[in-house]
Image (cartoon, rainbow, N blue to C red):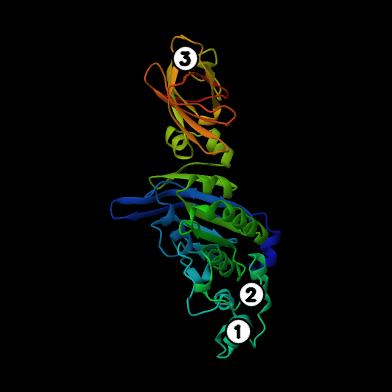
Amino acid sequence: MNSAADHTSTAPVLVVHDLVKRFGDTVAVGDMSIDVERGEIVALLGPSGCGKTTTLRLLAGFERPDNGSVLIGGETVVDSQTWRPPERRRIGIVQQDFALFPHLSVGENIAFGLTGGHRAWWTRPWRRFGRTEVPARVQEMLSLVGLDGFAHRFPHELSGGEAQRVALARALAPEPAAVLLDEPFSNLDQNLRASLRVTMRAILKAADTAAVFVTHDREEALSLADRVAVMRQGRIEQIGSPDDIYYRPQSRFIGSFVGDANIVPGRRSRGGAETELGYVLLDDAPSAQEGESLDLLLRPEQLALKLADPGQAEAANVISSEYYGHDQVVRVRMASGREIEVRLSTDVVYRIDDAVEVVVLGDGIAFPR
């Protein structure tokens, strides 16, 4: 399928159906099914050992599945009868360590995956003496990733963020149907990650390609992806938009994994629940008997504090406070002994041993106990 056809097609660019991979008795990936549209960014999020990297390797062609099929750009690249090696899958790959060739310049690294005259550029013995014009496609990629003028630099002359962008430019240069990114921010300094996530998303959107990246970092997944697939023990437990995953998790595991969470016991009552925090509305349709025991998930930012009246019974006490400037995280101990985490603005700063009352601002998510 040519590039023009890709642009006009309404079918998903990447179609994965019932993908299975076993290593001995261990099911690394089980019945994996997912579609990715053109221009869409999907994150595979999960703890170490959940199968997300194995999934990426199956899509790239580095591993053979035991069952299932993968279609890329409308063409089957693997099923029970078909197997295409990585170089015939129209897939761009950004490795965790970027995998730039140290002996090639930035421009030569980008040109490496191209064919014809573009690729011939880096084979010329006099290329490093500045007497060659950078090929148009290489220059286009340099502009896309914001590295104009970097064509003749070498990998050791780049910062971590610049090396990451070169690796992405190299992956995008051959106009792949999809791009796979393996923990793309793991080798970068923490201070660079937030700004580079914005840059990465803008580049991928400008390239208008389907993208799948794996990460164990919830902030990366929620801020970069259009959809997040949360994986556990080789399977997707939930897939949806970042706000769906964060505010409407379908299990306690997902709720706790994708964000800080308070789990509070309660009993269903009048469409909500009675808890030690008081009456809490539930973000679900009544589906159980009155009085049923359940656990509520409340995000720290769904709670607030106010100073308790002197001598107020059942007051909570502040046991720790972390001040970040833009906000603060306060941990309190309820009269029951349960600890609750609250994320607040900094207009009022709470101190250890302050007597406070916890106020619920948002609806809770209920899980059967």
The image shows residue 220 at horizontal and vertical percentages of: 52, 49
Label pair 1/2, CB-CB below 8 angstroms: yes
Q: CA distance from mark 1 to mark 2?
A: 10 Å
Q: CA distance from mark 1 to mark 3?
A: 72 Å
The residue carrying mark 1 is 121
The residue carrying mark 3 is 289
Compared to 341, does 68 lie above or below?
below
Write down the quadrant of residue 92 in the picture. bottom right
- Left or right: 175, with 57 as reference point: right
Which amino acid type is shown beneath numbered disc 1?
Trp
Instruction: Tell me the SS state at disc 3.
Output: loop
The image shows residue 192 at horizontal and vertical percentages of: 54, 55
Which amino acid type is shown beneath numbered disc 2?
Val
Identity of the residue furthest to the bottom in this view: 125
Compared to 93, does 296 lie above or below?
above
The image shows residue 174 at horizontal and vertical percentages of: 60, 71
Instruction: Tell me the SS state at disc 1.
Output: helix
Instruction: Tell me the SS state at disc 2.
Output: helix
The residue carrying mark 2 is 138
Residue ID at (68%, 71%): 140
Which is nearer the eye, 8 or 227? 227
